[in-house]
Image: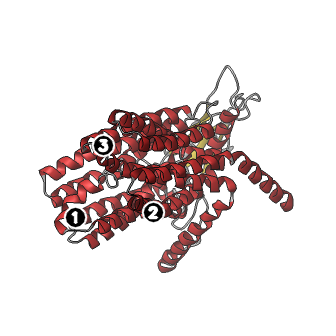
Amino acid sequence: MSVVMNINQSTKDEGGEINLAYSHDTGSPPGLDHARGDSPGQVSLPVASPPPGSAEGEAGGRQGDDVDSGELHCAPTNSSSAPSGTSSDPRERDADVEGKESGAVDGGWGWMVAIGAALIMMLINVLGPCFSIIFSRFLLDLGTSSTTVGLIFNSFQFLWNFSGPILGPLLKEFSWRKVAMTCSLGVFASLMLSAFATSSGFLLFSYSVLGGISCGLLSNLCFLIIPHYFAKRRGVANAIMMAGVSTGPILAPMLVRYLQEEYDFTGATIITSAVVLHCCVGAALFRPIRTNPDKASPEEPKDRVWSLFLRVIRGTFTNLYILKSPRAAIIAVSGAFTLNSWLNFIALMPFAVQAAGYSLQAAAWCVTTSAVCNLVARLIVSVLSDWPKFSMRACYMASTATIAATTVAFSMIHDITWLTVVMGVWGFGVGSYMGIYNLIMVHYMGLDKLTPTIGATFMLVGIGFVTIGPAIGLIRDLSESYSASMWVLAGMAAVAFVLWIFMPAAVRWDERRELRHRNKSQ
């Protein structure tokens, strides 16, 4: 296999825009003079597939075994109006440089990667939002206590988020596709084994442990992969993935409810697991975009497994050092507060609506309204993030403020019509926040630090599930008021808003520290 680069030799165009496309031409590149070894404007570079054991950086993971036979042609686009690389907008120039350094496709097969990520995010949302629909009949027949039910679900959510720091080291050892395919099979196995569960204890293993870790790694991987495949069109690609994130909770409950009504628990859960198995289709679309020619020294099978385990553990703890950066600390802590705020609120809201004297159907309408507005906001904000004048920080802060304000407003309103309106505004705030959740990390931390940043953030979110969640329930029991709990949740979002006020100072602090390090090294 070879990589062929067609480079315009014009003196006016020093950095052309590079388009990547595969071709399965196993012969010699056209125009290459083998006798001389070169030709005008063309260079042929051999690329060796890395053997098992070689490692690649976070931007691409280990891709060697997944690369199809063929060539990766890199040809600049010739523009007659202006030379490429001379954009007047700083964000576009940064995207050009970042895209070339990371090998971002910015189109072509990259759109299939975005569709694959959307499919995966839509399917894995069957396990979380549909927990009660899938397992309520089974757990009620067993006479399972509410405490045990809460333990099963919260353990699932905890492991979903706490698995974040593990993903970075895994991607250094294996390719995106291998990790995604393995986790997709793990999600399938989780539901398949749960279909034959005979006790709540077995469900704690099959659903909470196996499903939580597999879904968490898949979810984090989808958030990570879009920025690596796109630079200038990152917002549009992210919008495609966000469409999958939002449509999953809307469509999945209807499908799962239908299956549970038509079949018994075991049959319905087996069919659901077969549906979730289509995550493998999305994982298969994660086609590698580059290889690492570095070779690793051969190891004995036992030594290789042990060294792999040690590298993953070491890499997991090393990635947590990212929190020493004030920028990363603000992103991670504010993200943990905000996500725990709105996730606990949406879990509490149906109970508050029914306690106010309204039906469960009214509460369902509130949830549906927020979900639709959430979807619309995610799509709009993701697409707008590609606009040079769009301020991610301003959008992030406005979204956090909206979440805090609407959470307080919901606790003070008693008319169901206005409660539904407030939930719509709340959903728009959540969608605006999550629409650029991963993009703002790239914006402030860079692509090379995205993996440890998102891993540390989700780890803190997971810790919040087992600490903040029970505390909110305790406040509700002691005060006998849902309003008190909602005020606490609104306060958490307000704290996140305040933290983002200090982001410019954190950026300057990190810049000065990096400058001091460079001066010392010289």
Q: Disc 1 marks which amino acid?
A: Leu
Q: Specify which label sits upstream in the sequence, 2 or 3.
A: 3
Q: Tell me the residue that label 1 is attached to.
A: 139
Residue 437 at what x, y percent from top left? 53, 46
Residue 45: mark:
none
Q: Specify which label sits upstream in the sequence, 1 or 3.
A: 1
- Mark 1–mark 3 Cα distance, whole angstroms, equals 23 Å
| Foreground of the two, 189 or 159 | 159
Residue 348 visible, this orientation: yes
Q: Tell me the residue that label 2 is attached to.
A: 471
| Foreground of the two, 440 or 64 | 440
Cβ–Cβ under 8 Å for marks 2 and 3:
no
- Mark 2–mark 3 Cα distance, whole angstroms, equals 23 Å
Q: Nearer the viewer, mark 1 or mark 3?
A: 3
Q: Residue furthest front?
A: 479
Which quadrant would residue 297 be assigned to in this image? bottom right
Picture residue at 64% right of the left edge, 64% below the top = 321
Q: Disc 3 marks which amino acid?
A: Ala
Residue 53 at what x, y percent from top left? 53, 68
Picture residue at 48% right of the left edge, 80% below the top = 302
Which quadrant would residue 477 be assigned to in this image? bottom left
Residue 295 at what x, y percent from top left? 60, 65
